[in-house]
Image (spheres, helix red, strand yellow):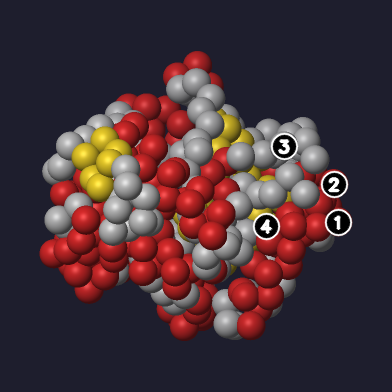
Amino acid sequence: MSPALFESRLEALAALGVQVLPLGEAVERLRAGTLPPRAAALTFDDGFFDFQQRAWPLLSRYGFPATVYLTTYYSAFNRPVFGIAASYLLWKSGRESVSLRDVTGQDISLACQTAAERNAVRAHLETYADAQGWGGAEKDEMLTRLAAAAGAEAHDRTMRRERRLHLLTPAETAALAAQGADMQLHTHRHRTPLDRALFLREIADNRQALKTSGTAADPLHFCYPSGVHESEFIPWLREAGVHTATTCDTGLAQAGDEPLLLPRLVDFSQLLPIEFEAWAAGAPALLPRKTRHGIRIG
C-alpha cells in the first residue's frame, strides 16, 4: 500500500468520526460493552522497516495509536526476510526459469515467470533449507546465490541497501515503543507448530525478545502468523498467558467473540474506498467475504 493510499485511509477514519483506540483498551471495552458507536484499533503485522519509515509518521500526525504484532527472529538477525525476498528477486529478474545448480547444488531448473511459479520456487528452497537444518545465515547466503543465478544481483544490492524487506531492529522497535507504539506477540519465527512444546517456545522466545530489547514489558496480545489458527492453539495460548489473539478472518469483532479468535479487516490496495468506509462505519451488509492467508516468514 502506498503512503498516499494509507493516508487516505486515515483521513477517512477521521472524517467518519471513528475513535481509534489502543488495542488493549479496545478489547477491554469491547468485552464490557462500552465502546463508542464507531471505534477501531489499528494493527500491523510482522514489523517491517517501512512501518517506521512510512506508517508511523502518518499515524502520529493523526494522533492514532497503533499496535505492531512483531515477529522477532528477523528483527535481531536483520537481513531480508528469506521467503518473500526470494520471490521478490525472482520477480525482479523477469526470467522464465532459474537454475538451482549454483543455489542448492541441484541440477534442476524451475519456472519462475508467474506468481504461482515463484511461490513454488520459494517453497522448494525453504523445504531444502529446512532439510539441511539451515538457519538465517545459511538461508541468507542462499538468497545471494539465488540473486546471482537469476541475474538479479543489482536488485539484491538495492533491496539490502534500502532495507525493503527487512524488519525493524530491536533498537528501532524500542524507540518506537518509547514514542507510544504498542508492540505485541507474533511468534519468534513466524510459524505456529502443531506441537505444544514448539508452539509455546515460539511464544516464549517472542515474548523474551520483546522484553529484552525494552520494546514491551509484558506483551499479552497475539496475532496468528499468516492468519493460520487451529483449535489446539486456544488452550496453548491460554497456558502462555495470552489475553487476545487476532486472526485474518474477515469480520467485525463482537462482545461475545472468543477473545483468542478475534476477526478483523485485513486492508489491501485493491479494497475500494467505499468498501473501506463501509467497514469504518460498521455496515455488515457491505463487508467482503472471509479470507485466509498463507505467507510464511522465516
Regarding mark 3 in the picture, which secondary structure is present there?
loop
Q: Is residue 193 left or right of residue 2?
A: right
Residue underneath mark 1: 239
Residue 235 image label? 2
Q: Earlier in the sequence, mark 4 or mark 3?
A: 4
Q: Is residue 11 visible?
A: no
The numbered mark, 2 or 3, whose residue comes first in the sequence reads 3
105 relative to 178, above or below: above
Give the class, few, some or many, for how many residues have Cα within 10 Å of label 1's Cα (few <14, many ≥20).
few
What kind of residue is marked 1? Glu
Q: How many marks?
A: 4
- Indicate the secondary structure of the residue bearing disc 2: helix
Q: Which mark is residue 230?
A: 3
Residue labelled with disc 4: 221
Nearer the observer: mark 4 or 3; the answer is 3
Mark earlier in primary sequence (1, 4): 4
